[in-house]
Image (spheres, rainbow, N blue to C red):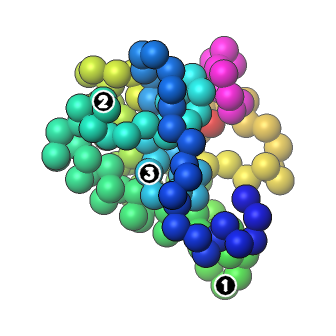
């Protein structure tokens, strides 16, 4: 992303072109849509996967809080440490809600929530929720915990 892009509307988001969507990750890629294909990482339109109005609303609601924290962390100012703490707390509101949503959508499409980590803190090897070793058989990211619906 270049500097100009930060002030531009997202008109040219890369959409998933996989023939079928076999998994989803809810992840903040600094766009307006956190629903991404687990295979190619591109964004997936909620209508394509037939999310209900309730599901779409709860994702939007969850995302408004989680992306606010993520942006505060990126901003590296007065709220950086606060935001990081909240994002890293497995019992924090955004993580509880995000995993709850992932669990619900998984009834139809296996879905995981991207769990925040700071690359300065090294590569994660354990699930931040259950502390078991991550399953590293992933297309992108460090690993996943299927039990906890976590992708990291
Ligand atoms: Zn895809
Ligand atoms: Zn876990």
| Residue 23 point in image, percent of width and height | 45, 22
| Pointers 3 and 2 in contact (C-beta within 8 Å) | no
- Labels 1, 2: front one: 2
Chain part drawn in magenta: 130-143
* Relative side of 86 to 81, left or right: left
Residue identifier under label 1: 78
Which of the two discs, 3 and 2, labels the residue nearer the N terminus? 3
Residue identifier under label 2: 49
| Residue 25 point in image, percent of width and height | 49, 34
Element under label 2?
loop
* Relative side of 1 to 24, left or right: right
- In which quadrant will I find the C terminus? top right
Instruction: Measure the C-alpha gap from mark 1 to mark 3.
Output: 27 Å
Crowdedness near tag 2: few (<14), some (14–19) or many (≥20) residues, C-alpha within 10 Å: few
User: Which residue of the protein is positioned furthest toward the bottom in this rendering?
Assistant: 78
Q: Is residue 12 above or below residue 149?
A: below
Residue occupying image coordinates x 58% and y 63%: 70
Q: Is residue 68 above or below residue 15?
A: below
| Residue 104 point in image, percent of width and height | 26, 32
Q: Which mark is residue 33?
A: 3
């Amino acid at each position: 992303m270049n500097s100009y892009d930060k002030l531009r509307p997202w008109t040219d988001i890369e959409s998933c072109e996989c023939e079928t969507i076999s998994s989803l990750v809810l992840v903040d890629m600094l766009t307006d849509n956190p629903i991404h294909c687990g295979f190619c990482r591109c964004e997936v339109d909620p209508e394509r996967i037939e999310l209900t109005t309730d599901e779409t609303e709860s994702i939007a609601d969850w995302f408004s809080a989680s992306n606010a924290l993520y942006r505060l962390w990126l901003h590296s100012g007065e709220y950086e440490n606060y935001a990081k703490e909240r994002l890293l707390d497995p019992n924090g509101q955004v993580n509880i809600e995000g995993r709850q949503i992932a669990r619900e959508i998984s009834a139809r499409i296996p879905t995981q929530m991207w769990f925040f980590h700071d690359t300065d803190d090294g590569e994660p090897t354990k699930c931040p929720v259950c502390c078991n070793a991550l399953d590293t058989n992933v297309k992108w990211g460090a690993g996943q915990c299927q039990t906890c619906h976590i992708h990291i």
